[in-house]
Structure formats: C-alpha cells, structure tokens
Amino acid sequence: LTAPETAFPTLRGAVAGLPSYVPGRRSAGLDIAALASNESHYEPLPAAAAAVTEAAGTMNRYPDSAAVELRERLARHLGVTVGEVAVGPGSVGVLQQIITGLCDAGDEVIFAWRSFEAYPILVELAGARPVRIPLDDAEGHNLGAMAAAVTDRTKVILLCTPNNPTGVPISHERIEVFLRSVRSDILVVIDEAYVEYAEAGSGPDSLSLYRQYPNVCILRTFSKAYGLAGLRVGYAVSAPAVAEGLRRTALPFSVSALAQKAAIASLDAGEAMESRVAAVKQERARMAAQLEAQGWKLQPSQGNFLWIRADDSLRARLVDAFDRADILVRGYQGDGVRITVADSASNDRVLRILETHAA
Ligand code: PMP
C-alpha cells in the first residue's frame, strides 16, 4: 500500500497562520544580562525553594488537580471565597482557559495594541477574532475606542494594567466608567501580571471593581514579583460560575505540586517579596531619572520594565547594540524596545548603552 504523495497532515488554518515561536538567546553565558522577559532577577525565595524540595518527594504522584490548598490560601490572601479562585499553568494558561471557555468560533475579543503578545495568539487558536485597539498617544489604553468596538459578538475584553510592554497603568476611575458602559455579559479581564510593581493608586483597586461588577475577572501571576516564572502558576478571581467554568476547561493536573507548594510558600513570604519589589522600584526610578537626563522621553512605567518607543531603524540599532553587549532585551517591530529592570549592575550596563544612542 503506498500513500498518495500529496497527502500529509495539515495544520488548521488558525494554527498555520500563527507566528513561529523563536526562542530568545538563553542566559547561558557568564555575563549575559537576561532583560527580555520581565522575570525576577533574584534567586528563588528560600521558603519557596524549600517547599519545592519537599514537594519533590511526591513527584511520582499526580498533584491535587483542584489545587484546593493553594486556592484556599489565595482566597484568604485576597478576601474572596475559594469558589471564586481558579489557578492554571501561568496566567497565560488561565487566560487560555478563559478564551476557550467563553469564545465560540467567530466571537470577538477586544484588547489594546500593543499589549501582551499572547493575546492575539490565544484568541486565534480558539477560532475567535482578535480586535486590536491602538494605544493612545500616552501609550495607554484608549478605553473610549475599546467600548466603541463592542459588537454583538464581543465575549471578552482584555485590559492590561500596567500594560506590557509600555508600563502605563489604567486608573481605577477610568476602568469604572468603562465598566458602566459595557454590557454585563462581556467578561472584562483585568490582567495584573505586574501589579506588585505598581505604585499604590496608579492602577485600579481591582478587587473592589470585581465586587461591584461581577463580569470582572482579575488575572494575576506568580511569575513576576514572586519569582516563580519557571514553575508556571497563575490565577484568576471571578464570579463562581466563571471560575468553575475555567476549572472545567483546564487540562487536568496542569499545575504541578511543586508549583502549588511554592506558590503557597511565596504568599507566606510576602514581606520578603515586597522588599525585593521595593528595590526594583527604586532602580526603576533611578533609571528613569538618568534616561531623562540623557534626553530620552519615556512614559513613566509602573512595571518592572522600561519602554522605549522607537521606529524600526532605532529599534534595530538598539537591539543590535544590546546584543553586542550581551544584554538580552525585547524588540517589537514597528513599536519599540522593552527592557526589564534588574540588579543595579545590569541596569548600569543598560544605561551606558542607551547613553550612546540618546537623541
Ligand atoms: N500577562 C502579561 C501582561 C504578561 O506580560 C505575562 C508574561 N509576560 C503574562 C500575562 C503571562 O505570564 P505567566 O504565564 O508566566 O503567568
């Protein structure tokens, strides 16, 4: 029996059209500064590392698929009930549960652009339609235009505050006005991956918005300030019916026992996390001041990263200069360059490169 030469398994159209994943250079070298992914540059919190070591003894067993202990700990931390909490393999995993749980083929998901790159990918994978609304002149969400883009097919709206990659937050008041204007059957996700780095009051009090507007879903992660990017654990807070749906769309056992235990230990070590965050915020302010003195005009960032708006020629020159200096940053075609704020030695290297390219 010979197979016809032309027959070959083909990808779905939505998948074939997705960008290929191009892995960045790994920080394998001795002196490479890994500033491309907004990770924490600190070593794992000792309590989290100890919890992982202990949990490793159970890795012949499946983890608790319902992650009850972690969800209870989160519920206590946030002042909600355990039924309002869903966890997943990173907040990107939870977001995939949200999109696949709510969107049928052809439904629409509205988000600002530029924002987190995974948004359009997850939407297209689900067969839904990404609706990108350009950022305003101050690199923030244009909520008026986002509200105006709502149609009968809109199922989900994604708000990212502070926004990745621009660092600009959305104020509580602006989100509240927005929530008043959109239908209550649209899930409004407030993606707060970087919330720990935001100055108090710069962004929304998302829990109080959630209490007032049950169609709000708060999305957070242990990958950034808590320093658990490699363990993959994130969570959502939403109305119990939505949270229950998210748990149903999750892959079974997708959050390992190591990740669950480390996340619990990290919540318990909140003060240690906060002092690390405070140091990053101080470095962020120091860098912003120096860059301004160098002549750069940047929007203040509320994340653990800085955003340099750049046309493609400047972007290419910057990325190339950083690359030659063994500093990994993230360049975005047509938009600019994002640089993670890390330890002061790495930050000084960044400042030296940028000084030679200042206007
Ligand atoms: N949301 C935003 C805005 C992000 O920048 C990221 C990570 N870059 C995520 C979600 C996903 O992070 P994780 O899956 O590690 O929780």
Image (cartoon, rainbow, N blue to C red):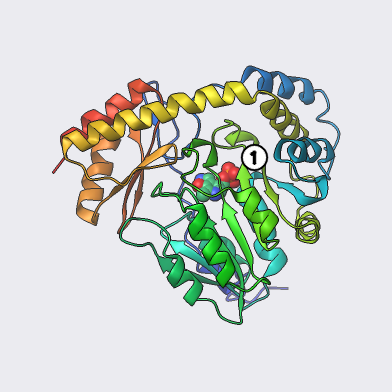
Q: Is mark 1 within 8 Å of ligand 1?
A: yes
The C terminus: image quadrant: top left
At which x and y percent is residue 178?
A: 53, 66
The N terminus: image quadrant: bottom right
Determine which quarter of the picture holds residue 78. top right
At which x and y percent is residue 59?
A: 80, 30
Count numbered badges in the picture: 1
Residue 71 shows in the view: yes
Residue located 67% across and 61% down the image:
213
Which residue was labeled with disc 1? Answer: 232
Residue located 49% across and 47% down the image:
203
- The residue tagged with tag 1: helix, strand or loop? loop
- As drawn, the residue found furthest toward the left would be 359
**Amino acid marked by disc 1:** Arg
The residue nearer to you, when weighing 29 against 49, is: 49
At which x and y percent is residue 119?
A: 53, 59
At which x and y percent is residue 236?
A: 68, 50
The residue nearer to you, when weighing 98 against 289, is: 289
